[in-house]
Image (tube, rainbow, N blue to C red):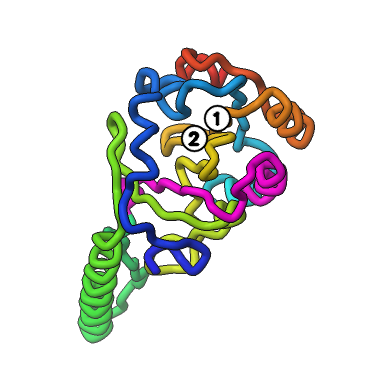
Amino acid sequence: MAFGPAIRVPADASAALWIAPALGSFGTVGGLVPKGYERYLLLDYRGGEPRGSDGVNRLFEQLVPVLARHTSTPEHCWFAIWEGHGFDTSMTLLAAMPRDDAERRDVERERQRLREDDARRNKSIRTALRRLPSFDLPNRRYYLVSGAVNAASQIERPGGKFPQPPDLWWPEDRRWFVGGDTDLDWCYIGGSVRLLSVVAAEFQGRTRAVDWKASNAAAGE
């Protein structure tokens, strides 16, 4: 499975086709979260957690139980993962300082072996990714998978056991929507006033209300 055992592969990407017509301008809150929700909230990744995917995963682990209580379909959610994360271009680096010609030849043989291993692994990953349905939004293309809501913190990068948080995720009943982007240190959540009040209480000091039309730069200040 390209993104780990917690997710399922749908037959097609039709479940995501409603998103594009409901988006605002690229580079705004509405460029990531569709219109129509009562309120929009920014959840900041920056804080005590480790930076990067591990930190985002910890936040999502904390966020999942809250969101699960505010949907009628917690066992059926959708996860979109940007194709530009470089899944099939990974390289293994070998740090070595050969002391003589014999060691230099050994190091070069080992580097060649690693390059061949990388090429085989990346080819396998590309094959697995081609089996996934995908869809386009302005300036981004995403793979689409599905699973229970708690899969949000259990998705893995292809070819390894490293976490890969989804960029966009929402339940089948569309009661809420979480949208983030590779260029941002936060995500946005669209949902009811009641839900976002609970999220704000759960993540005190790390959330703030944002306008759907606000630019990402303004929202992140």
174 and 206: which one is in front?
A: 174
Residue 204 in the image: state x and y as whole percent. 77, 31
Q: What is the x, y in percent for residue 124?
A: 26, 71
* 177 lies left or right of 92: right
Q: Quadrant of residue 142?
A: top left
Of pointers 2 and 1, the one earlier in the residue sequence: 2
Marks 2 and 1 in Cβ contact (< 8 Å):
yes
Query: Foreground: 137 or 107?
Result: 137
- 63 in the magenta segment: yes
Q: Tell me if 5 is positioned left or right of 110 in this view.
A: right
Please identify the quadrant where the N terminus is shown.
Answer: bottom left
Secondary structure of the residue carrying tag 2 is strand
Q: Give the Cα separation between the discs numbered 2 and 1.
A: 5 Å
Q: Quadrant of residue 105?
A: bottom left
- The image quadrant of residue 167 is top left
Q: Residue 160, relative to residue 24: is it above or below?
A: below
Residue to which mark 2 is pinned: 179
* Residue receiving disc 1: 188
The magenta region covers: 60-86
Residue plotted at (51% across, 57% down): 147
Would you say residue 182 sits in the magenta stretch? no
| Image point (37%, 50%), residue name | 144
Q: Amino acid at mark 1?
A: Tyr
Work out which quarter of the rendered image holds the C terminus and state it: top right
Q: Mark 1, residues whose alpha carbon is within 10 Å: few (<14), some, or many (≥20)?
A: many
Amino acid under disc 2: Gly
